Structure formats: structure tokens, C-alpha cells
Image (cartoon, coloured by chain):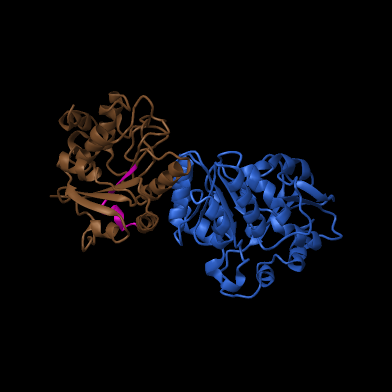
Chain colours: A blue, B brown
């Protein structure tokens, strides 16, 4: 996904004089050639994430469409107040593109993880959040985001599904059943499909949890049983689902990354197991919960 | 019109609090900027080639509002309901509600980064005439975000930005070696002036040179004196 972002962003800078990229050292080498051609619109501020967002806000104030990029924990967690004030409160937008989703950087430890990034962005109004599940979904999401001025968060991961779905801005059913609706966000689709094999459930996929497709949710949640499987902090979209179904009885199971700091390294698969997001544990959680 | 004529406007905002240090410390610098330096027009507040003035130190904006009113950016009767429920004027300015206000500010340490981005955005669009001015306080420099901007602007020779630091010695731990040196070590041209001397402030602002960002440290009375 990261390479898809680099390729697409480089092309956009080449084609669209309104697009500008702000970096804080991360991925700077990959944009070296583009920076040589467009030094005024490819800006590496060094390891200064507060400034990266401040600069993005300033660029937007002059009418440019800034893309700011780093690891999620530095881009979102560290610079949260700049996102809140230098973008949202100024009434301007930007495209924030992260790598290092949740525990992608497991071997680097908790300092390089951000399972809470989407929940932090969700505290602010008006953001579109894209969580692609496949590298093939990245280019169109980024290109579409450069065509307007609203705030967009594009969360890239090293975890990926087998298939790219171009039409998954809304809830896209990929398996049909009767007992429950299981919503898989981004790269959770692959483990969810494995976990639900043989179960009588509908599985719906989306790469865009904000705005959440509440119309599709209401249509697909006919059983009243909804399981929400997100690749970031568990329960991040629970309030949206609950509000959308407030007028009808329903049961909601929210699974995702737990709030625990595991103080461990290893692989993303190791962390998925410890947070209960591997296919085996997901299946146990679902079958225990299903009516 | 002189700065003395702004005082009745300031009084409409602050009443008995008109000498509140944070409101008053900036008055002369703001007046010089709007009266002698900034290329801004209240009839064309969105002119893309206007100079930009960013009040980073959003605290005590009464002097800012009074100067904006004096220069025709906002109606004088707005000054009579500071921070009222329906008033566009609050204790920290909101760019979406006040004509001529370039940034919403209040939380310290945001204006210089936004100013650097604004200067870069103008340059990227070939707008080389507008200059970006950012007003900060000496205590505001405690925020580390400022130093990210100071280092980057200096290293890249961003010569369309001017910082103005109002120094009323309110930083809890002070700035040993002076404020100007903090900028100069990163390649800024720096000048320290009497913040109450209009000619000195104007001269300091106009000393900006090609190839480097510029800072004017405007020294005023010590806070609380």
C-alpha cells in the first residue's frame, strides 16, 4: 500500500499544481526525484510533526491541497492538537496519509504503534476516513481525495486482503447469511472471511468507515445481530452503529485492537492473536456470541 | 489617524481592563503594522496577493480588534459586546467570524507553523510579493512547536516571513542570551527594538533581507510593572 501511495502521490504532484506533499523525514527518500522536480510542492520539514501539520494548514489557507504523511503514531497521535486547530478549527482540510497501522510495526514496539488513530480523528467533525484493505484500492481513494478540499485520513497497512474492492465506499456484501451481519473494515476482511467460513452470516466489507454507510447498515442488519470487526481500537464505530439502529432492537459485538499495551515485539500476526483478531479467536468470539 | 485615536476603541472592548498587559503590550506594534507596513485592504480581504498578518499569540486580542476596527475591517459596534454569546469577537480570535483575521488562535505555538506553511504556499503559486507576518509573545516561545518552525524556516532561507516577538519578559524561565539569538543561530536576520517607538518598529520590520527569514523583537514594559 505504501508503494501505491508513493506512486500515486508522485503522479498527482506531477499532474496537479494544487497538490503539495509535506513530509517529516518518513518516506522522504522515496519522493527524492519528485522533490527535485517540484521543490516548492514536495517539502520535507525534518522530524518535526507539529510543523508538518502546521505547514499543511498554511498551504491549505493559500488554496493548495496538502498531503501530509508519516507513521500514524507521529502523524496523528503526536500532532493531534495541530490537526484539531491548524486544520479543523481554521476551516481548512488536508489529506493525512499514514503507514504503520495499529501493530504493523510490532517489532519496533509500542512507541511505533497507533491503534487509536481513527478514534482520535473521529473526535473531529467532517472527516472522511479510508482504511483500504488492498494496495489496489489506494490510488483511487487518494486521487478522489485530491479533487476537493475536505479533510481526509487515509490509513495504510502492511496487512492486506486477497482481493481489491473498488466499490467498497459503502458496505459491500461479500457473503450472504441470515443470523448476523458481520462488518469487516479494511484488512480485517481476510481474517473475517476465514473466521466465518461455514457460518450462516452476511459479511460486508468497507474501506471507508467515515462516513459510515448507515443506510447500508440498516438494510443489511435485518437479523438485528451486528458484529463490527475493525483493525484499530475496538468499538471505534460502535457509537455510529448504535445511533443508526437506535429505533430497533439489536445486539452489537465490537471487536478490534484492545487498549492493552502488550509490551511485546514479534510479528503483526503475534499481536493479532493477543488482541483476539486472528481467524481462530475471531471465530470463537463470533460463535459464542451468535444466537 | 494615530494610535491615540485607537484608545477609545480599545476602551470599548476592555473597559476597566484596558491596561491588561496581554491586550496592551501589542498595541503599538499592531498599529505600525496596519498603519505603515501591511499591504492589506479591508475592501478586498481575500485578495490573494495581500500580505498576511497572523496573530499567533491569540491572548488579549483587544488591541488587535481595535486596530482592525480603526482600519475598517469590522464595524465599531462589534466592540461593545466582547465575548458575548452572539458576538463574533471572543477572547481569542476566530478567522471564520472576523473579517481580516487570517488565523484562529489562542492555544500558543501554532501561528509560526501556519505562517511558514502560508509563505510556502504563496511561493509555490508564484506569489512572491506578499509577505507573511507572525506576531508571538516571549512566553509563547516556551512552546516547542515554535522552535520546529524557527529551525526549518532558517535552514531553508524562507525569506518571505517575518516574526515579531513582543517581549514583556513574561516567560517563566526567561531566555538567557536573549530572544534574537534564538532565531539568529538558525540563520534568521534579527533586530531588537523598542516596542513603543513606532519609527524603530517600522525600521526593524523593513530590515528584512533576501535569503533569510526575519525577526523583530519588540521590547515593551515588563509584564506586571
**Which of the pair B41/A106 is nearer the observer?**
B41
Q: Relative to residue A206, is residue B4 depicted above or below?
A: above
Question: In the shown orientation, is residue B16 left or right of residue A155?
Answer: left
In which quadrant of the rendered view does residue B169 lie? bottom left
Residue B52 position in % (x across, y down) = 36, 38
Report the residue at 37% width, 34% height from top: B50
Give the x, y percent position of residue A121.
55, 50
**x and y, in percent, of residue A289 in the image:** 75, 59
Above or below residue A236? Residue A158 is below
- Asked whether the viewer can see residue A208, the reply is no
Where residue A147 sits, quadrant-wise, is: top right
Asked if residue B134 lies in the magenta stretch, the reply is: yes
Q: Quadrant of the C terminus of chain A?
A: bottom right
For residue A164, above or below residue B77: below
A148 is higher (above) or lower (below) than A239: above
- The quarter in which the N terminus of chain A is drawn is bottom right
Q: Residue at x 68, y 68 (%)?
A: A272
- Name the foreground residue: A62 vs B144: A62
Task: Using the image as rendered, state which of residue B141 and residue A277 is in the foreground.
Answer: B141
> Residue furthest toward the right?
A198
Query: Would you say residue A52 is visible in this rendering?
Result: yes
Q: Is residue B206 left or right of residue A247?
A: left
Identify which residue is drawn at 38% across, 54% down: B149
Task: Describe residue A289's horizontal placement relative to residue B14 as left or right.
Answer: right
Res. A245 image quadrant = top right
Residue interval drawn in magenta: B132-143
Q: What count of labels does the image hold?
A: 0
Picture coordinates of residue A90, whole percent (x, y): 44, 41
Query: Does the magenta run of residues contain A136?
Result: no
Amino acid at each position: 500500500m505504501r508503494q501505491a501511495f508513493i506512486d500515486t502521490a508522485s503522479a498527482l504532484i506531477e499532474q496537479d499544481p494544487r497538490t503539495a506533499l509535506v513530509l517529516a523525514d518518513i518516506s522522504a527518500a522515496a519522493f527524492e526525484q519528485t522533490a527535485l522536480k517540484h521543490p516548492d510542492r514536495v517539502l520535507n520539514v525534518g522530524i518535526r510533526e507539529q510543523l508538518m501539520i502546521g505547514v499543511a494548514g498554511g498551504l491549505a489557507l493559500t488554496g493548495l491541497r496538502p498531503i501530509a504523511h508519516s507513521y500514524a503514531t507521529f502523524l496523528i497521535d503526536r500532532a493531534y492538537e495541530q490537526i484539531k486547530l491548524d486544520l479543523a478549527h481554521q476551516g481548512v482540510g488536508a489529506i493525512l496519509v499514514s503507514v504503520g497501522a495499529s501493530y504493523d510495526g510490532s517489532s519496533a514496539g509500542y512507541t511505533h504503534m497507533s491503534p487509536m488513530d481513527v478514534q482520535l480523528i473521529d473526535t473531529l467533525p467532517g472527516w472522511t476516513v479510508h482504511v483500504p484493505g488492498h494496495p489496489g484500492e489506494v490510488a483511487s481513494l487518494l486521487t478522489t481525495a485530491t479533487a476537493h478540499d475536505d479533510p481526509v485520513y487515509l490509513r495504510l497497512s502492511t496487512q492486506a486482503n486477497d482481493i481489491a474492492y473498488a466499490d467498497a465506499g459503502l458496505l459491500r456484501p461479500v457473503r450472504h447469511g441470515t443470523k448476523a451481519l458481520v462488518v469487516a473494515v479494511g484488512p480485517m476482511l481476510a481474517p473475517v472471511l476465514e473466521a466465518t467460513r461455514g457460518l450462516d452470516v452476511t459479511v460486508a466489507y468497507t474501506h471507508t468507515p467515515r462516513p459510515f454507510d448507515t443506510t447500508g447498515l440498516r438494510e443489511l442488519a435485518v437479523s438485528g445481530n451486528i458484529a463490527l470487526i475493525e483493525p484499530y481500537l475496538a468499538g471505534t464505530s460502535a457509537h455510529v452503529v448504535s445511533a443508526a439502529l437506535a429505533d430497533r432492537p439489536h445486539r452489537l459485538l465490537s471487536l478490534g485492537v484492545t487498549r492493552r499495551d502488550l509490551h511485546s515485539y514479534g510479528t503483526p500476526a503475534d499481536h493479532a492473536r493477543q488482541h483476539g483478531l486472528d481467524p481462530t479467536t475471531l471465530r470463537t468470539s463470533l460463535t459464542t456470541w451468535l444466537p | 489617524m494615530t494610535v491615540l485615536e485607537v484608545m477609545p476603541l480599545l476602551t470599548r472592548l476592555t473597559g476597566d481592563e484596558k491596561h491588561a498587559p496581554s491586550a496592551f503590550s501589542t498595541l503599538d506594534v499592531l498599529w505600525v503594522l496596519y498603519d505603515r507596513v501591511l499591504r492589506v485592504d479591508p475592501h478586498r480581504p481575500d485578495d490573494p496577493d495581500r500580505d498576511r498578518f497572523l496573530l499567533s499569540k491569540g491572548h488579549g486580542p483587544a488591541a488587535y480588534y481595535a486596530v482592525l476596527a480603526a482600519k475598517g475591517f469590522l464595524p465599531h459596534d462589534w466592540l461593545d459586546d466582547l465575548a458575548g454569546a452572539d458576538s463574533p469577537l471572543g477572547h481569542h480570535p476566530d478567522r471564520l467570524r472576523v473579517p481580516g483575521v487570517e488565523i484562529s488562535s489562542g492555544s500558543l505555538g501554532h501561528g509560526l507553523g501556519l505562517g511558514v506553511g502560508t509563505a510556502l504556499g504563496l511561493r509555490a503559486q508564484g506569489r512572491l510579493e506578499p509577505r507573511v507576518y507572525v506576531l508571538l509573545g516571549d512566553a509563547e516561545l516556551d512552546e516547542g512547536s515554535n522552535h520546529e518552525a524557527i529551525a526549518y524556516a532558517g535552514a531553508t532561507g524562507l525569506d518571505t516571513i517575518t516574526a515579531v516577538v513582543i517581549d514583556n519578559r513574561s516567560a517563566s524561565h526567561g531566555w538567557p542570551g536573549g530572544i534574537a539569538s534564538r532565531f539568529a543561530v538558525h540563520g534568521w536576520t534579527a533586530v531588537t527594538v523598542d516596542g513603543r517607538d513606532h519609527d524603530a518598529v517600522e525600521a526593524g520590520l523593513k530590515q528584512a533581507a533576501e535569503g533569510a527569514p526575519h525577526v523583530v523583537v519588540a521590547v515593551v514594559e515588563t509584564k506586571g510593572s
